[in-house]
Structures are given as structure tokens and as C-alpha cells.
Amino acid sequence: MKADGYSLDDKRTEIKENDIPDIIERFYALDKEKDRTRKEQSFLVPKADIVANDYDLSINKYKEVERVKVEYEDPDVVLARLEGLQNQVAEAMAEYKKLG
């Protein structure tokens, strides 16, 4: 469950995000849940897996996280661009000082 329909602050005001109706609906239709993958919001876990994990019900024991490889720009390119921007700022500041 990501949201219970109330804000997380001390006021606990009602919010739009609410997973409880979906949880109830899925509970009463468990036969349809058998094909859900471990990458989804909710899924079923065989009892044997739970026993093998000493009855640890931590989601991280069972959920498969899909990792996306992030390609970063070469640091030298980023530093060169940053240096150019710093030079532009320094030039602009020098111009403003001449005016004032």
C-alpha cells in the first residue's frame, strides 16, 4: 500500500490517492492475482518461499526491482560546460560593476 487516503502529516486530511479499495477488490478476487509478476504493486508469494525466508514478510525479500541503467554525460564535458557558464557569469558581473 502506497496511500491510505489520508495525508502523512499530523492533520491526516483526506487525499485523492487511496489504495484501500483496490486492495479489498484484489483480496476478493485472489484467483485473478496468480498471474501477477513480482514487479507489480501487489503479487502472491508461494508459502514455500515465505518458509524459506524464515517467515520474513519484508517486501524486499520478494519484490523484483527493475533497474534501469542511467547513462551519464562524460564528466569532462560537464565540467567544461560549467566552466564556460562561470566565465559568462564573471563577464556579466564585471559589466554590471562598470555600470554602477
Image (spheres, rainbow, N blue to C red):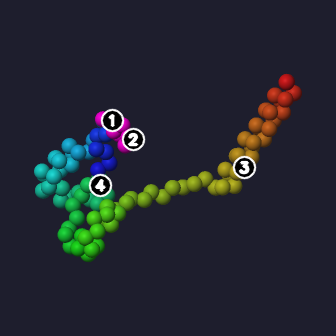
What residue is shown at x 80% (from left), y 38% (from top)?
A: 90
Pointer 2 with pointer 1, Cβ within 8 A: yes
Determine the CA span between mark 2 and mark 3. 43 Å
Is label 4 or label 1 in front? 1
> Mark 2 and mark 4: span between their CA atoms?
27 Å
28 shown above or below 17? below
Query: Magenta part of the protein: which range?
Result: 7-15
Q: Which residue is mark 4?
A: 40
Q: Amino acid at mark 2?
A: Asp
Residue at the spot of label 3? 80
Which one is nearer the viewer's eye here, 13 or 20? Answer: 13
Compared with residue 2, is residue 93 higher up or lower down, i.e. above or below? above
> Does 28 sit left or right of 9 as displayed?
left
Mark in the foreground, 2 or 3: 2
The amino acid marked with disc number 3 is: Ala
Q: Earlier in the sequence, mark 3 or mark 1?
A: 1
The alpha-carbon separation of the residues under discs 3 and 1 comes to 48 Å
Q: Residue at x 85, y 24 (%)?
A: 100
x 38%, y 40%: residue = 10
Q: Is residue 21 left or right of residue 60?
A: left
Q: CA distance from mark 2 to mark 1?
A: 8 Å
Q: Secondary structure at mark 1?
A: loop
Q: Which mark is residue 13?
A: 1
Amino acid at circle 4: Glu
The residue beneath circle 2 is 9
